[in-house]
Amino acid sequence: MKKVDVRDRILGGILGLCVGDALGVPIEFASREELKEDPVTEMIGYGYHNQPPGTWSDDTSLTLCTVDSLCNGYDLEDIANRFLRWFKEGYMTPSGVAFDIGRTTRVAISRLKHGFSPKESGLTEELSNGNGALMRILPVAFFVQNMNLEEQMRITHEITAITHAHPRSLIASGIYVQIIIGLMDNLDPETALLRAKRIAMDFYQDKPFAQELRHFGRVFSENFRNLPEHEIFSDGYVVHTLEASIWCFLNSSSFEEACLRAINLGYDADTTGAVTGGLAGTYYGVKAIPERFLRKLAKAEEIFGLVEKFFKSLYK
């Protein structure tokens, strides 16, 4: 594959996430069986949330809140305040209203509203391992790429833990960020995953992480890519979303193929689409995202401008 430059990867990753989210929004909660009979191949609208084509959800909103904050450097309080503005004012939404908010995110943001600091607001229960932090962690990879591993993981974990503070969610974000960093270093998908595995197995060998690593055994197994589709789950559990997104990415040869494969798994289609879109967009670059998708994406020009600003802040 032709080498993709850094700007194209960052634009591709974030716009790819937005496109994957918007492709999945109308079919969120649709069953895999329904989508087998009538697969989605275009940016359609309405459906479950009754939103026009190109509408994106909380995945994109919270990602863009993070991007906008990181343009000015790392400030955890500022990121948390932007999440609050999204929740209360509809900041960084397509139509001025936040919708499709996950339970853990809703509770954590309510805690922020009641005076908890962003280092205390995240939920730590095992049942709070939804995908609501994984779906927004992508820009952190671009921000921390040139830092040492300790700093990369510290910032990744802190931003994850604003809402999802259980070690399993922290590991999922850490793995995803390390895959993205590998792709930014021009590694192919399989090698980027292998690199992330090596880093995770070493970094997470102590408590409270060590006992959680077993939950990532499938995604790190040698034959993961060859698992049949019926063994890939696309619900809202963070490990399943990580698995489904990596599986779709490994089993495709273009941005479009990866994203359409992801959303047509059904159920939590927007988040599986967003997390897959982040991987595929980073790898293939912004030029690989079909123009017909970008044309329909809500506020595409504003997103493009924000990501350009983010890129310039990173590579002054």
Image (spheres, rainbow, N blue to C red):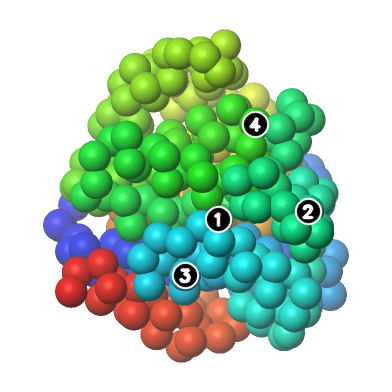
Around disc 1, counting alpha carbons within 10 Å, would you say few (fewer than 14), some (14 to 19), or many (20 or more)?
many
Rate crowding at label 4 as few (under 14), some (14 to 19) or many (20 or more) other CA atoms within 10 Å: many
Helix, strand or loop at label 3? It is: helix
The residues bearing labels 1 and 2 have C-alpha atoms spaced at a distance of: 19 Å
Which residue corresponds to the image point at 73% horizontal and 84% vertical from the top-left?
96
Q: Amino acid at mark 2?
A: Arg
Dot 4 or dot 3: first in sequence order is 3
Q: Nearer the viewer, mark 1 or mark 2?
A: 2
Secondary structure of residue under mark 1: helix
Q: Nearer the viewer, mark 2 or mark 3?
A: 2
**Total numbered labels placed on residues in the image:** 4
State the CA–CA distance, disc 1 to disc 3.
13 Å
Q: CA distance from mark 4 to mark 1?
A: 16 Å
Circle 4 or circle 1, nearest the eye:
4
Residue for point 29% across, 62% down: 9
Numbered mark located on residue 69 in the image = 3
N-term mark: 1 or 2: 2
**Mark nearer the N terminus (2 vs 3):** 3
Which residue bears the numbered disc 2?
A: 111
Measured Cα–Cα span from mark 2 to mark 3: 20 Å
